[in-house]
């Protein structure tokens, strides 16, 4: 009999462990707890305002569901998935070994140092991948009406980010240049700018990053450190900043150009919309498939 969610929450609160039996396959609590820790960083960021006890109980519940669904798909793939030729499994194993720094990393990820068991895991993974590919291979293309409707409903999300093209003079603080020295050098550069010296010439003279005349190209918010963006995104075109500090040192920035956020025409984002609609269709197909497996499965908590 499936345990009520309230009882699951109580078990968590009391520190009790739970073992799942999914269609006869025993799943230890440690597997669920591994899934909890895998999901935790993103989950706690998104739901940080939720009551801590409720948040932890829901995280456990979602992790449990993830494990159940993964086990059911694996079981189906073992019984009904396409056979994978041994040569393909061996080739995949060798490729994975090459991608890892050493054998210990592969053993840790696999939970075993037995090569046969690792290959069995690889074979199962390949079966699952091909099972899901087969499940989605005959899905129709999104219709023109669906694409237009998506565009209409998501214009703000499709809007391009504001961009600025900026250059800077930067003096890093290091073992060779302490903070007072770096600051005084930047004050000298600022004085020369005020007296008419070309910005690009002073980049070559003072900056620790003189390539391309200090030109950073077009940037959007999130590409640079926040304290740098707070200055450059508030400059007018051709305006030069005062000396300012970031975690990297002292800067003087100049703004060359600004591209405001705009809603692109449908033709420019059509492919992006089609890709997203296709992904939604694939997700729906997989969800429906998993729901069918769950409806037929016997899931017990002991």
Image (cartoon, helix red, strand yellow):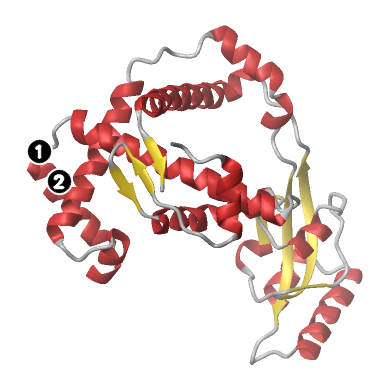
Q: Which residue is mark 1?
A: 85
Left-right relation of 56 to 179: left
Res 231 quadrant in image: bottom right
In the depicted view, which residue is nearer to us: 211 or 258? 258
Q: Are marks 2 and 1 in contact (CB under 8 Å)?
A: yes
How would you rate the neighbour count of disc 2 (Cα within 10 Å): few for under 14, some for 14-19, many for 20 or more? some
Near-viewer residue (38 or 3): 3
Left or right of residue 286, residue 207 in this image: right
Q: Is residue 240 above or below residue 119?
A: below
From the viewer's perspective, is 223 left or right of 114? right
State the residue at coordinates (19%, 44%).
123
* Residue at far front of view: 1
Percent coordinates x, y for residue 230 in the rendering: 82, 58
**Residue for point 89% across, 76% down:** 191
Evaluate whether residue 265 shows in this view: yes
Residue 158 bears which disc, if any?
none
The secondary element bearing badge 1 is classed as loop
Q: Which residue is mark 2?
A: 89
Residue 220: give x, y in percent of width and height. Answer: 69, 48
């Amino acid at each position: 009999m499936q345990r009520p969610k309230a009882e699951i929450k109580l078990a968590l609160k009391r520190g009790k462990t739970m073992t799942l039996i999914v269609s006869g396959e025993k799943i230890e609590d440690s597997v669920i707890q591994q899934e909890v820790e895998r999901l935790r960083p993103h989950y706690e960021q998104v739901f940080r305002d939720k009551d801590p006890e409720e948040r932890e109980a829901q995280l456990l519940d979602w992790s449990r569901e993830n494990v159940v669904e993964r086990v059911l798909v694996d079981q189906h793939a073992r019984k009904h998935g396409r056979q994978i030729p041994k040569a393909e499994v061996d080739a995949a194993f060798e490729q994975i070994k090459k991608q890892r720094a050493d054998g210990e990393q592969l053993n840790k990820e696999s939970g075993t140092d037995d090569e046969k068991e690792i290959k069995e895991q690889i074979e199962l993974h390949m079966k699952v991948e091909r099972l899901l590919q087969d499940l989605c291979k005959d899905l129709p293309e999104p219709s023109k009406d669906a694409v237009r409707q998506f565009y209409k409903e998501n214009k703000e999300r499709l809007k391009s980010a504001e961009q600025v093209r900026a250059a800077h003079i930067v003096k890093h603080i290091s073992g060779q240049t302490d903070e007072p020295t770096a600051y005084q050098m930047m004050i000298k550069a600022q004085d020369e700018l005020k007296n008419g010296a070309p910005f690009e010439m002073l980049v070559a003279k003072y900056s620790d990053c003189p390539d391309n005349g200090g030109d950073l190209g077009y940037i959007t918010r999130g590409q640079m450190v926040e304290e740098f963006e707070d200055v450059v995104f508030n400059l007018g075109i051709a305006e030069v900043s005062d000396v300012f500090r970031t975690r990297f040192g002292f800067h003087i920035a100049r703004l060359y150009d600004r591209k405001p956020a705009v809603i692109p025409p449908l033709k420019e984002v059509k492919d992006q919309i089609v890709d997203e609609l296709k992904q939604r269709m694939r997700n729906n197909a997989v969800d429906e498939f998993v729901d069918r497996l769950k409806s037929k499965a016997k899931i017990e908590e002991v």
